[in-house]
Image: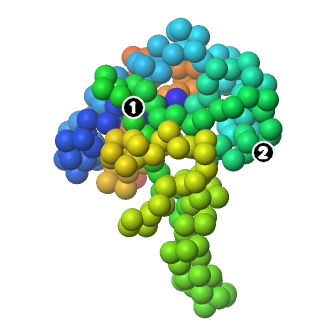
Amino acid sequence: MKTLAIGQSFYSTYRENREAEVFGELNSGTAQLSQYLDSGFALAEEFLEKRYIDAEKALQTKKTSDDLEEFVKGESPFMLTGAWAAGRVKEMQPDFDFEVAPYPVLQDGALVVINADTRLGVNAASEHKEAAVKFVEYFTRAENIRKFADQQASFSPLEGGAPSTVAEIQPLIPCYEADRTVIGSDELLDLPIWNLTAEVSRQLLSGQPLEKAMAWMDEQAAEERSPS
């Protein structure tokens, strides 16, 4: 739900190349998160009201574990999750075909939310610093990045990187290549949006009105901006 809300809410910001401006305002407090995220979470709330999402069940479901098992039963028409879960679902051998689709939430089409999900770093105080650096150098060779991204049903960060060959995620590729994308947790934004939106999602699933959930989010963002 949080990914759906972030994507729908910030899509126009990315299309207008206003990321630095908008996130700068959010960082300083001259703009509130609710000003942007209200529309996305209103859509999520609509999903709940129309019973597209079973709120009670969702609250008790472990992400990319219980939800995959529930989906494989064939009793749910769709599942909100990451593309990288495609491999896990396929290994569970469902008795139906499935594919990973972009979010069809725009008036003129769909969008994809992306994240830099795999990060590598070496602790400067590491006991085996030289060996760790060599591993990172090996892992980040172009051919190994390509292999890893393909195995994870993910997009390659390489310039000119080829799309994943995983059949189930092919519907995402046109959106990605057309730059119809939103970054889920942009480094330009200092606020912990991933955690804040996750809690807003939990509140909505628990029956909290959207207005109160948005007010809570803005209060938490204000505390994050305040010097400790």
Q: Above or below — where is 114 with respect to 41?
A: below
The residue at which mark 2 appears reads as 91
The residue at which mark 1 appears reads as 110
Q: What colouring style does the render use?
A: rainbow
Q: Amino acid at mark 2?
A: Glu
- Where does residue 67 sit, x and y in percent of width and height? 71, 31
The mark found on residue 2 in the picture is: none
Q: Hey, which residue is sitting farthest bottom in the picture?
A: 130
Q: Amino acid at mark 1?
A: Ala
Can residue 223 be spotted in the picture?
no
Place residue 217 in its image quadrant: top left
Q: Is 203 on the left-hand or right-hand side of 180?
A: right
Determine the residue positioned at 60% across, 91% down.
130
User: Do callouts 2 and 1 mark residues in contact (Cβ within 8 Å)?
Assistant: no
Of residue 67 and residue 123, the one placed in the foreground of this image is 67
Label 2 SS: helix
Q: Is 125 on the left-hand or right-hand side of 56?
A: left
Of residue 8 and residue 165, the one placed in the foreground of this image is 165
Q: Above or below — where is 143 with respect to 156?
A: below
Along the polypeptide, which appears first: circle 2 or circle 1?
Answer: 2
Of residue 98 and residue 78, the one placed in the foreground of this image is 98
Determine the residue positioned at 61% across, 41% down.
168
Q: Above or below — where is 10 with respect to 184?
A: above
